């Protein structure tokens, strides 16, 4: 639908409809507001009049007239109910005597207590406007009412809004009818205007254009006088048609004259033109043949150059992609080794990554043993598992590592057969074909070497491979130094805390050696139940440090020979939490702190300090709980002598499933029965 007339009518109609709807809505809203204001003012005026009349009767001592007054006023059709209630909501006087003594609706009592003395509500299908007016106690009322009462009563007036709703409905209907009639008149007026002053003139112009299109210029005239604009438009159109007719007649005349002239010259000029054209074409063809031969030679020469460039570009692309792959490998290797602080894991990771990056079969790291002067295998990749990982390689001529130590820089051996001073058989059990080796340094001194051997594709290593391995070695040197510093720092922390534990136990003859024994028992039991190396490491540290929290317990409680009081027991139960707080600054002991905190938890959830369930209780803490209890029972204490091993094992068996995890308790008892409990 692309009619301008329909578009104009549609847009105008939408604007008129929106305008009329908006105006109607605003009028209805204004009428509603005015009616509500009239209802509020009327209700307030009636209520004030009633209250003043009642107060006058009460002031003159005519209390019996109050009820009659309410009955008379309530006879008005607009008043639904009229009552007086006290501040508790109990009806005292009402137009309906049956309501006296009942409670008023909750809305009336809530309005009085919140100070909302005028509000509208709906009961059933009827709308009301409520007025709440209190009777304040005044000096004139003190003779009948005490001074302590601030409010003598509350007047409640319900005014019906049904008449106002009817009036509003009639007004709304009238407004809607008037708005619809106005909208219809406007639409019809605009439609008539378009048909008379726009559509009819345009149709006349279109008819004249159709005559002009078919060449009927005598009928292609339009006479439109409906408006000045249309009159001007039709005049211009008529003038344009007349000019077009004149131009066409002139053109036809000229074409006829030219046709006669051309016909006379046709024979003579045609022959001459053909001869001249033929000679020109022959010369052009000869010239084109010469140029074509030259271009063919140039194209052949260009093809040879393109082939050479393509070959050169292919080689450069291969080298570039190889360099990108190596840089990417170096980047990921750097991320991996910088995230590893365990030396053994670091050496194995470096060996593996270097071997993969250089596409070789074998890679290994040898570290200097400063005590013996030999080289120990730090890590290896691609070597058969049969080699001795504890093998010490002597630092002497015949090995590539010896040459690197002597010269403090990397070495490239493309073919070992051409170097008789280098042994072809490695001490790690493989035959070397092509080898590169780079030094690992610490503050300028060589501390080890990293070596890769035998490319997988059978080729030879190059200088670029040596440069890449040297870069890897530089990264590895930094990572090794960081790992060693981390281990030294960790050992310093542990030695310090271990010394603190030893000092605590040294002050008490009864607990001397307790942590050491618990550590031995725990490690043996941990290996028996299949803990990993990392779990055994955490368990060992936790066993050494499990009682460090006792440094915060009063020594008189620790050495007390009498039976501990409940208060003493509560204080003693704090030592796991105290130990956690002591070790909190040591970040690498995070997992160890959890084991220490849980070593007095129980399988039945009655342990301390947190009362954990079996699923929440760490396996290492379950092991430590059994071993700690066993050593406590088999050691002398201030309040008793040591129990025998048989009695201690029986106690553990009796409390299995309540105090101890059954699987851990059974494993400990089995270890003792097999005679594998360390001394």
Image (tube, grey):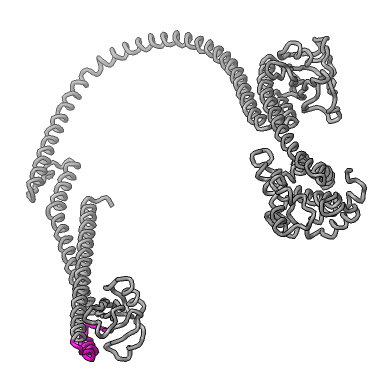
In the image: residue 596, left or right of residue 631: left
Residue 338: x, y in percent? Answer: 65, 30
The C terminus lies in quadrant:
top right
Query: Which span of residues is magenta-colored?
Result: 60-82
- Residue 526 in view in this figure: no
Q: Is residue 80 magenta?
A: yes
In the image, residue 453 above or below residue 80:
above
Work out whether residue 301 can be spotted: yes
Query: Which residue is painted at 38% across and 11% down in the image?
Result: 284
Q: Is residue 569 above or below residue 443?
A: below
Q: Horizontal and vertical percent for residue 366? A: 78, 22
At horizontal 69% and vertical 53% (from top left) the residue drawn is 571
Q: Dividing the picture into quarters, in which one does residue 463 lie?
A: top right
Q: Is residue 111 above or below residue 366?
A: below
Q: Residue at x 70, y 34 (%)?
A: 493
Q: Magenta span has 294?
A: no
Q: Nearer the viewer, residue 402 or 150?
A: 150
């Amino acid at each position: 639908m692309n009619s301008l007339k329909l578009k104009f009518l549609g847009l105008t109609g939408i604007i008129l409809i929106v305008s009329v709807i908006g105006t109607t809505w605003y009028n209805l809203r204004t009428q509603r507001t005015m009616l509500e204001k009239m209802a509020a003012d009327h209700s307030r005026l009636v209520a004030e009049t009633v209250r003043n009349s009642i107060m006058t009767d009460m002031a003159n001592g005519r209390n019996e007239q109050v009820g009659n007054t309410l009955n008379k006023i309530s006879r008005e059709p607009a008043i639904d109910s009229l009552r007086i209630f006290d501040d508790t909501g109990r009806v005292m006087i009402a137009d309906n005597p049956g309501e006296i003594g009942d409670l008023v609706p909750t809305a009336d009592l809530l309005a009085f207590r919140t100070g909302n003395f005028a509000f509208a509500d709906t009961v059933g299908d009827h709308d009301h406007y409520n007025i709440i007016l209190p009777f304040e106690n005044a000096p004139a009322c003190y003779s009948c009412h005490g001074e302590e009462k601030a409010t003598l009563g509350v007047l409640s007036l319900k005014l019906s809004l049904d008449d106002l709703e009817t009036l509003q409905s009639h007004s709304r209907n009238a407004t809607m009818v008037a708005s619809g009639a106005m909208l219809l008149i406007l639409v019809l007026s605009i439609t008539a205007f378009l048909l008379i002053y726009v559509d009819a003139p345009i149709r006349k112009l279109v008819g004249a254009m159709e005559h002009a299109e078919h060449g009927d210029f005598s009928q292609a005239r339009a006479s439109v006088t409906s408006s000045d604009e249309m009159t001007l438009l039709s005049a211009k159109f008529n003038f344009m048609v007349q000019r077009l007719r004149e131009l066409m007649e002139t053109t036809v005349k000229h074409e006829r004259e030219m046709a006669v002239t051309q016909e006379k010259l046709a024979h003579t000029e045609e022959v001459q033109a053909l001869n001249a054209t033929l000679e020109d074409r022959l010369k052009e063809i000869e010239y084109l043949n010469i140029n074509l031969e030259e271009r063919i030679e140039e194209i052949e020469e260009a093809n040879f150059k393109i082939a050479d460039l393509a070959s050169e570009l292919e080689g450069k692309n291969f080298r570039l992609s190889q360099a990108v792959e190596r840089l990417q490998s170096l980047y990921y290797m750097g991320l991996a080794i910088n995230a590893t602080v365990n030396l053994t894991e670091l050496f194995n990771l470096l060996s593996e990554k270097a071997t993969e990056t250089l596409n070789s079969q074998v890679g290994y790291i040898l570290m200097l043993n400063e005590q013996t002067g030999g080289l120990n295998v730090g890590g290896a990749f691609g070597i058969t598992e049969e080699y001795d990982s504890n093998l010490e390689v002597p630092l002497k001529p015949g090995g590539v590592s010896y040459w690197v130590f002597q010269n403090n820089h990397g070495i490239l051996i493309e073919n070992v057969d051409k170097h008789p001073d280098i042994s072809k058989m490695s001490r790690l059990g493989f035959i070397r074909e092509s080898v590169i080796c780079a030094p690992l340094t610490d503050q300028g001194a060589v501390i080890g070497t990293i070596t890769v051997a035998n490319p997988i594709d059978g080729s030879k290593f190059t200088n670029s491979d040596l440069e890449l391995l040297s870069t890897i070695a530089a990264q590895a040197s930094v990572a090794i130094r960081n790992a060693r510093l981390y281990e030294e720092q960790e050992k310093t922390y542990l030695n310090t805390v271990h010394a603190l534990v030893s000092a605590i136990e040294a002050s008490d003859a009864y607990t001397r050696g307790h942590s050491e024994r618990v550590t031995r028992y725990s490690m043996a039991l941990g290996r028996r139940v299949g803990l990993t190396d990392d779990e055994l490491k955490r368990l060992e540290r936790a066993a050494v440090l499990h009682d460090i929290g006792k440094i915060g317990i009063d020594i008189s409680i620790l050495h007390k020979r009498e039976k501990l009081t409940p208060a003493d027991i509560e204080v003693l139960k704090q030592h796991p939490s105290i130990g956690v707080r002591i070790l909190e600054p040591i970040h690498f002991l995070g997992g160890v702190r959890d084991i220490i905190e849980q070593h007095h938890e129980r399988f039945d959830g009655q342990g301390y300090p947190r009362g954990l369930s079996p699923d929440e209780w760490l396996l290492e803490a379950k092991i430590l709980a059994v071993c700690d209890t066993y050593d406590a029972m088999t050691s002398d204490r201030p309040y008793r002598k040591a129990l025998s091993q048989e009695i201690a094992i029986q106690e553990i068996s009796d409390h299995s499933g309540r105090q101890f995890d059954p699987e851990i308790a059974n494993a400990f008892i089995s270890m003792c029965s097999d005679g594998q409990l360390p001394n």
